[in-house]
Amino acid sequence: MAPPAERPAGLTNLQKRTLSAAVLLPVAIAAIVFGAPWFDILVIIFAAAMAWEWTSVVATVRNPGETQPVPAPSTPGWGVLAAVSAATAILATWRAPITGGIGSAWLVILVGLVVVAIVGLMVDRRRAKWYVAGILYVTVPPVALIVLRDDPVGLETIVWMLALVVAADTGGYLVGRTVGGPKLAPRISPNKTWSGLGGAVAGAALVGLLTAFILNHTNVLELTLISAVIGLLEQGGDLVESAFKRHFGVKDTSQIIPGHGGVLDRVDGLLAVAVAVLVINLWAGGSVLAW
């Protein structure tokens, strides 16, 4: 009789995902509900992690014939770039709640851009633009999140945004898998379809409609349409991050969240949504949920 097959050691990917979610979700929900300083601290931690992930991906060595990229943390200047990027993300998000706005946060971001540009040109002139782009990518959305949460209707805004992101991703996945059809951007994200994009927009619009009724919004159609447009931008944010990873030949930005990959892998759509909502609020002179 053959001996029984041994079970593989360690947790499965599904078990890792479940445990990670069980730990992170209560923490995130509590931070969102209680607001400052807990929400600010959570965003600052995530911003620093994103800065490290972006810098490490850009500093990746990818040689012809290699199926997996080889991290190059020993590259001269890599540590300096990672430290400056993380420090800029931390200081910018920290300054936003102190000043009650984004004025001094922008000054921190500007200084970070200049320093990273100089060091990036010294380290690797070909990839310097990617290091600079990373500063904006990992600092502006976190600042937007903190400013939005500090608004009088900040809790409602953050919940609406998160529900919109989940609905857009879920609607896009379900419709895309069910209907299929022409690919949206096959070179960037082979699984995305135009029908999936429609499902994402519809899911976001539904969240806007429900939010309008729950909050007794004065203009249901307006919030529904705005949510639909933001759902479109959410999918654009997902594609931007996918394009970034495909350019550098990585599947995940890191393995910092067991079973889920990196922080950037999980919040790509939310980053775009946060910036979009802040721009709309600034343009309109008040929160979209309070119009």
Image: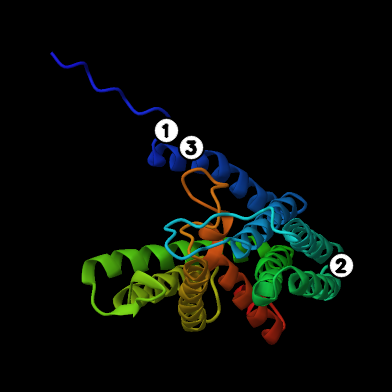
Gap between marks 3 and 1 measured at Cα: 10 Å
Front disc: 2 or 3: 3
Q: Position of residue 126 (x, y in %)?
A: 65, 76
Gap between marks 2 and 3 measured at Cα: 37 Å
Q: Residue type at mark 1?
A: Leu
Q: Secondary structure at mark 1?
A: loop
Disc 1 marks which residue? 11
Q: Position of residue 67 (x, y in %)?
A: 42, 58
Q: Residue type at mark 3?
A: Leu
Q: Earlier in the sequence, mark 1 or mark 2?
A: 1
Residue positioned 51% across, 43% down in the render: 258
Which color scheme is applied?
A: rainbow
Residue 180 to residue 46: above or below: below
Q: Residue furthest front?
A: 64
Front-lying residue, 43 or 55: 55
In the visual, does 166 lie left or right of 136? left
In the visual, does 104 lie left or right of 167? right
Q: Residue furthest left?
A: 1
Disc 2 marks which residue? 99
